Amino acid sequence: MKGRAAALAALLLAGLLAPDAAHACAVCTGNDSAAVSWALLKGTALLSLTPLAIIGGGVWYLRRRARQIAASEAERAGAERPAAPSARTA
Amino acid sequence: MSAPGYGRIRVVAEQRREPLVPSGVMGMLIFVFTEVMLFAGLISAFTIIRSSAVVWPPPGQPRLPFEATAFNTAVLLASGAALQWARRRFERRRASARTPLVLAIALGAFFVVVQGAEWVAMIGQGLTLTSSALGGFFYLIVGVHGLHALAALVLLGVTLARLQRGWLASSQLGTAEVLWYFVVAIWPVLWLVVYR
């Protein structure tokens, strides 16, 4: 167990110290062209940012809607509440 | 307040709060979220395959009709606008939403029919599902979108039938709207990525 952890640490260290040798991407299919790298970057950005944008948009919409409902309920409650008796009528 | 034999009874006024988002709309939004990710994956894969190709379109394969499809894209966008018009009229007087809703369905059906005709023309020119990566992706991406358009048209048809019978609730129209706006909004992206 101790040996395996040490081997893993050595592997990670080697990756950090020799980044060129460790530079390998499972999805790059060995193609080094700039167009493919750019397409991979765009694909990664699209797939990473889309869910965040949708969730962020959803949270923003729900907060806005909650505020709208709270405002309309407060307005309705204000309209239903009887007016306080004035000094003359009391 | 007390009632004989029951001790003290507290009368609680139960108030139904307006939901943040109607259940149907929320369900459709969750479905659309998963579909957005499906299309994002397809677009991503298509972009990578296209970038790694030396020649595009692949040799012996036709060029996709970018310009001709521009008109069809405009028709689909007009359909989305007609549905927005239907919503506005529905808010004022429900029965008056019928004409714009029929218009939205007609424009959407026109889009699907023209897409079908385009598929037939493309098959005639030798672009099939197995002829090349372009053919595979074209029929997969555009076909998945077409399926969504058909499903959304069926939902709009059900919505129209409910409207005519006077049963249509605002949330039911909203549910159909979410799906149709998704179909309308994703198409220009697909058109620009796949056809260009």
Image (spheres, coloured by chain):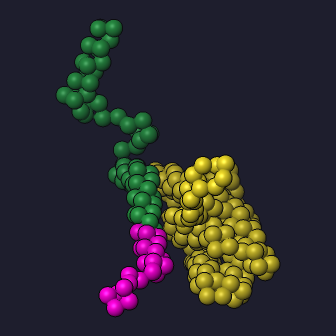
Left or right: A62 in relation to A21:
right
Residue B51 within the magenta-colored segment of the rendering: no
| Residue at the image position 66 percent from the left and 62 percent from the top | B148
Figure check: B37 above or below B102: above
| Residue at the image position 57 percent from the left and 52 percent from the top | B8
* Closest to the observer, B6 or B62: B6
Magenta span: A67-90
Q: Position of residue B58 (x, y in %)?
A: 56, 57
Q: Position of residue A89 (x, y in %)?
A: 38, 89
Q: Position of residue B179 (x, y in %)?
A: 62, 66
Is residue B156 in view from this perspective? yes
Figure check: B8 above or below B67: above
- Looking at the rendering, in which quadrant would you find the C terminus of chain A? bottom left
| Residue at the image position 77 percent from the left and 79 percent from the top | B166
| Residue at the image position 45 percent from the left and 77 percent from the top | A81
Q: Give the number of marks.
A: 0
Q: Position of residue A71 (x, y in %)?
A: 42, 73
- Looking at the rendering, in which quadrant would you find the N terminus of chain A? top left
Left or right: B132 in relation to B150:
left
* Closest to the observer, A70 or B117: A70
Q: Colour of chain A?
A: green
Which chain wears yellow? Answer: B
